Image (tube, rainbow, N blue to C red):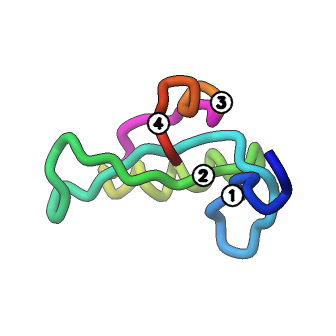
Amino acid sequence: MSEETTPICSAKGCRLDAVWVLAWNNPKIHTPERRKTWLACEEHREHLSQFLGVRGFLKDVVLLKEWEAQGQVP
């Protein structure tokens, strides 16, 4: 991937390359099968996971390369 298309971390102010996909949904507004995604670098994976987990939104945490290998788009 080129620099322009390399996915970056979703943490506020972070510009590091994403390594993880955090799949989530808000059950108050999304159907159960819907998955929204946040991307995370190694440094922010735990923080973003906890943020979503406390709210009951986090559904899965997958390596970005595995997510893409499954044909998913982050």
Of pointers 2 and 3, the one earlier in the residue sequence: 2
Residue that carries the numbered disc 3 in the rendered image: 65
Q: Circle 4 — which element?
A: loop
Quarter of the rendering occupied by the N terminus: top right
Mark nearer the viewer, 2 or 3: 3
Tell me the residue that label 4 is attached to. Answer: 72
Q: Give the numbered dot on residue 9.
A: 1
Q: Earlier in the sequence, mark 3 or mark 4?
A: 3
Viewed as shown, does residue 4 lie left or right of 10? Answer: right
Q: Nearer the viewer, mark 1 or mark 3?
A: 3
- Magenta span includes 7: no
| Pointer 1 or 2: first along the chain | 1
SS category of the residue bearing label 1 = loop
Q: Residue at x 62, y 62 (%)?
A: 10
Circle 3: is it few (<14), some (14-19), or many (20+) Cα within 10 Å?
some
User: Counting residues from the N terminus, which is met first, the one under dot 4 or under dot 2?
Assistant: 2
Disc number at residue 39?
Answer: 2
Nearer-the-camera pick, 15 or 71: 71
Q: Are marks 3 and 4 in contact (CB under 8 Å)?
A: no
Tell me what residue is drawn at x 25 percent, y 47 percent.
34
> How far is the residue under mark 1 from the one under mark 3?
14 Å
User: What's the CA distance linking mark 1 and mark 2?
Assistant: 5 Å
**Are there few (<14), some (14-19), or many (20+) residues within 10 Å of tag 2?**
many
